[in-house]
Structure formats: structure tokens, C-alpha cells
Amino acid sequence: MSYETLTHGRLTWTHITNPAPGDVARLHEAYPHFHPLDLEDCLSRIERPKIDEYDDYLFIVMHFPYWDSQERISRPGEVDFFLGVGYLVTVYESELKPLYNLFEQCQTDEETRAKYMDMGGGRLMHAAVDRMVDYLFPILYKVDANIRNIEENMFDENIQRTIQNISLVRRDIIALRRIIRPQVPIMETLEQIDRPFIREDLDVYFSDTLDHLQKARDIVEDDAEVINSLADTTDALASYRINEVMRILTVISVIMLPLTLISGILGMNVPLPLPLRPITFWGVMGLMVCISISMLLYFRYRRWL
């Protein structure tokens, strides 16, 4: 857990990473007007983003993805914003590096601190959200690269590996869609909010971030269509290969049927009209070979092989 504050001019940025109950209690002491349910939300995982508007502050919950390399899937990281006159509070998970990097830059670089904090909490919150949205694109470009790799190798002999890769990418795309799509209405609302702590000229900034977020959403939707098409193609290819194997096995079984019948008849423990001579064995073997060749030629003529 980490509880840090940074003050520049008339703006104070409270920065909480991986919040614990002690951090929330400290936050409540610093800002007693925060609603208890909002403070409780900081300790619990909210599945859907939201905006709660109060007379003197906004409480905003958003989600942004981070890459889980062990499970090979994008996980949602929650960011909670308290925005009011003269302050911004960010509560988030440590996996969301861009937000931590922004806070660190504001701590160490006077120019960056002045750039983002001189214009109030709304401008600072926009900078945080904008960096998180920009962080989406390297993840999406990685998904695109995985899709291209599948397209190039989907006709390899190892169809099992192709199906596994498609399943992993498809699961990741589903996770990204679940994270990105609900953020668009939140950004549209931020663009339209008219409050003293969100200056009117910020609607241009939020509109630009909204465009980026919509672009990310469109990329995910396109990737979903492509991976579904690749999955259908792979299913058709796997079915074709299975049918080819089944056809060969069926041909072998059909050829073996008359041979099994002949060997079964000749193997019966009863007197047979054929004399017990060595040439009889080779004659039977020759008959079996002729039957096999005849059936193969017939299958070839019917284009079953």
C-alpha cells in the first residue's frame, strides 16, 4: 500500500496505490465530506465503471487493462477518482504503471508539475485518463501481432497448436471488450459535465481522449471479427483433415473385409476342396492381392482416393 500527497499551487493530488483500510481511514480524515459508500468502493472491486455526482465533488470509477503474462490475458485494473475544487484523489492498483509514472514525473519534474497541475484537478485527471487510454494501444497492437502470426501459421500441420493460440487470443479479446466498451459512456459523460472543478475548455481535451477510446473500441471489435473468422476457418480445416483420415481408414477397413472373409473361410477346421499343397497358400495370397488392387483401382476410378 502507498499513500502520498503532492501539492502545487492550489491543487493537492492524493495518490493511493493498492489501498488498505488504513489508507481509506486516512483519506476519510482528510476529506470527511466523502460519502462512506464511495470510500467503501475503494476497497472493493467494482465490475462496472460509474460516475457519482455530488454537489461538491465527483466520484468516478474506471477500468483499464494490464497484461497478465502468467495467464496470458488482459486483466482489468480499477482506478477511482475523487475530483473536487482544489484536489484530486486517485486510488488504483499498482499494475497500472502509466498512472504511477505520471505521479512520479510530477513529483520530480517542475515543468511537468506546472503543465498538469496549474489548470486544476480536471486537467490533471484528464492527463491521468489520457495516459491510461494511450496505454491501451500497445496492448491492442500486441493482439494484432498475435492474430497475424496465427494467419501465417494456421495451415501448418500442427492444427492443435493453432486452435490453442486462437482460443488464447479470443479470450484476451473478449476480456478487452469487457474492459473498454463500458468506458466510452463514462468519457462521454465527462465531456458534457459542467462543474466548477471541470473547466469548460476541458471538453476539447476529453473529446480528444474519447476519440482515442472509441478508436481502441473499434480496433477490439475488428479483432473480434477477425479472430472469429479465423476460428471458423480453423474449424473447417480441422474437420477436413479429420474427414481425410476417416476416409483413409474407411478404405482400409473396406479392403480388409473380403480378405478377412477369405482367411476366415480357409481357416475353418473342416475339409475344404482345395488340396493341402504349398502352392495353395500362394494362390490364396495372390487372390487377396488381386482383390485389394481391384478395389483400390475401383476407389480411384470413383475418385474416393
Image (spheres, helix red, strand yellow):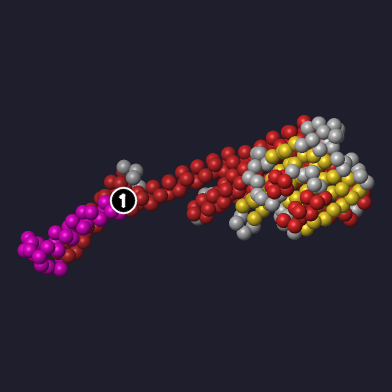
Is residue 273 on the magenta stretch?
yes
The answer to whether residue 63 is above or below residue 275 is above
Q: Is most of the magenta stretch helix, strand or loop?
A: helix
Q: Is residue 107 left or right of residue 299?
A: right
Give 12 or 296, whichever is nearer the viewer: 12
Residue where numbered disc 1 is placed: 250
Residue found at x 62% / y 42% = 177
Residue found at x 79% / y 43% = 33
Give 208 or 225, whichever is nearer the viewer: 208
Residue 55 is situated, as x and y percent measured from the top left of the image, at 79, 35
The answer to whether residue 59 is above or below residue 153 is above
Residue found at x 85% / y 45% = 87
Q: Amino acid at mark 1?
A: Thr
Residue 59 is situated, as x and y percent measured from the top left of the image, at 75, 41
Res 35 → quadrant: top right
Residue 153 is situated, as x and y percent measured from the top left of the image, at 56, 51
Residue found at x 72% / y 57% = 20
Q: Is residue 157 left or right of residue 302?
A: right
What range is drawn magenta here?
Answer: 252-279
Quarter containing the N terminus: bottom right
Crowd around label 1: few <14 · some 14–19 · many ≥20 (10 Å): few
Q: Is residue 98 visible?
A: no
Give 34 or 162, whichever is nearer the viewer: 34
Is residue 277 on the magenta stretch?
yes
Please, what secondary structure does the residue beneath circle 1 have? Answer: helix
Give 231 or 167, whichever is nearer the viewer: 167
